[in-house]
Amino acid sequence: TQQRGDYRCNTVSVSFGDAVWENAIVNYSADGKKLEKSEERLLIFSHFNGIYEEDDEYHHGRPMYVEQNKEDGDPFNKTTGAEIVYCNDIEAWVFRHKFIRTSNREENECSWLLKS
């Protein structure tokens, strides 16, 4: 059945084109846990092009896809990859990253950077 993943894609190939987000908030953390600093940066979505593989974790009962290493297609060892998840709040698939936000003030639904 589809719920077991029989008819679901295990990987998704993503190409964001030339979209950018000016003044995105990038949070830096050496250990992946404790926030050390934040700064505004130009977010170039094409840097996140590539293969996203279904993760073992689920988000809102749906599969979560995680960015893979561009060199060998394996999971990242030290880098935190971006995610594609389904957001129930807006009923859409969203692209997000643990350390990137659209604003320093109020966060949007599911911390999306792009949405379907």
Image: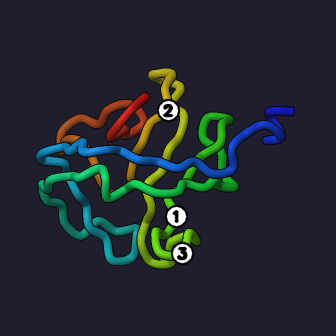
Up-down relation of residue 101 to residue 50 (above or below): above
Amino acid on which disc 2 is placed: Trp
Say which label, 2 or 3, has the lower sequence index: 3
Q: Is residue 39 left or right of residue 27?
A: left
Residue 105 percent location from the top left of the image: 18, 39
Q: Secondary structure at mark 1?
A: loop
Mark 3 residue type: Asp
Mark 3 and mark 2 in contact (Cβ < 8 Å)?
A: no
Neighbours of disc 2 within 10 Å: few (<14), some (14-19), many (20+): some
Q: Nearer the viewer, mark 2 or mark 1?
A: 1
Q: Which mark is residue 93?
A: 2
Mark drawn on residue 72 = 3
x and y percentages locating residue 91 in the rendered image: 51, 21
Identify the disc placed on residue 99: none
Camera-side residue: 81 or 18? 18
The 10 Å Cα crowd at callout 3, few under 14, some 14 to 19, many 20 or more, is few
Q: Amino acid at mark 1?
A: Gln
Q: Nearer the viewer, mark 3 or mark 1?
A: 3
Which colour assignment does the render follow?
Answer: rainbow
Looking at the rendered structure, the secondary structure element under dot 2 is strand
Label 2 or label 3, whichever lies nearer to me, is: 3
The residue to which callout 1 is attached is: 68
Q: Quadrant of the N terminus?
A: top right
Counting from the top left corner in percent of width and height, residue 70 is at 46, 68
Q: Assess disc 1: are there few (<14), some (14-19) or many (≥20) residues with their C-alpha within 10 Å of its C-alpha.
A: many
Quadrant holding the C terminus: top left
Residue drawn at x 42%, y 72% is 79
Marks 3/1: CA distance? 8 Å
| Frontmost residue, 78 versus 116 | 116
Residues at marks 3 and 1 touching, judged by CB atoms closer than 8 Å: no
